[in-house]
Amino acid sequence: MHRPRRNDKLVAAVASKLRALRKQWGLFQVAVCSDTDIHIGCIETGRASVSVLTPADLCAYYGITLEEFIKGVFVK
């Protein structure tokens, strides 16, 4: 049986970066959801894997490029 691919380390890094961006902007999850129609609760906790489109949309919302976001995900 085919199991979905999942990289838990990458999912956690993306979740952490998205949570940090939201907090940096001083926003609650409900405000981001209201503004973007993206339910970020499951994303920020790592329970949901997302396509590249979701972080790209959130980057546009936060006013950063996807390239800046990706660099921030892998820098510790």
Image (cartoon, rainbow, N blue to C red):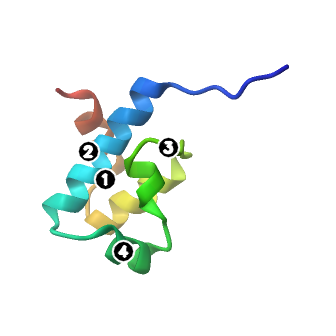
Q: Amino acid at mark 2?
A: Glu
- Per the image, the residue denoted by label 1 is 65
Pointer 3 local density, CA inside 10 Å: few below 14, some 14–19, many at least 20:
few
Residue that mark 2 sits on? 68
Closer mark to the observer between disc 3 and disc 1: 3
Using the numbered discs, state the Cα–Cα distance from disc 3 to disc 1 in whole angstroms.
24 Å
Q: Which residue is mark 4?
A: 30
Q: Position of residue 33 (x, y in %)?
A: 42, 72
Which mark's residue is nearer the viewer, 4 or 1? 4
Which residue sits at x=31%, y=53%? 65
Q: Residue furthest right?
A: 1
Return the residue at label 3: 47
Q: CA distance from mark 2 to mark 3?
A: 24 Å
Label 1–label 2 contact, CB within 8 A: yes
Occupied quadrant, residue 24: bottom left
- Residue type at mark 3 is Arg
Nearest the eye: 35 or 44: 44
Outermost residue, top side: 1
Q: Nearer the viewer, residue 13 or 64?
A: 13
Foreground: disc 2 or disc 3? 3
Quadrant occupied by the C terminus: top left
Residue 67: in sight, yes or no? no
> Is the residue marked by circle 1 packed among few (<14), some (14-19), or many (20+) residues within 10 Å?
some
Using the rendered view, name the quadrant where residue 60 is placed. bottom left
Residue type of the residue flagged with mark 1: Thr
Is disc 4 in contact with disc 3, using a CB cutoff of under 8 Å? no
Judge by depth and name the residue closer to the eye, 60 or 9: 9
Mark in the foreground, 4 or 2: 4
Contact flag, marks 4 and 2 (Cβ < 8 Å): no
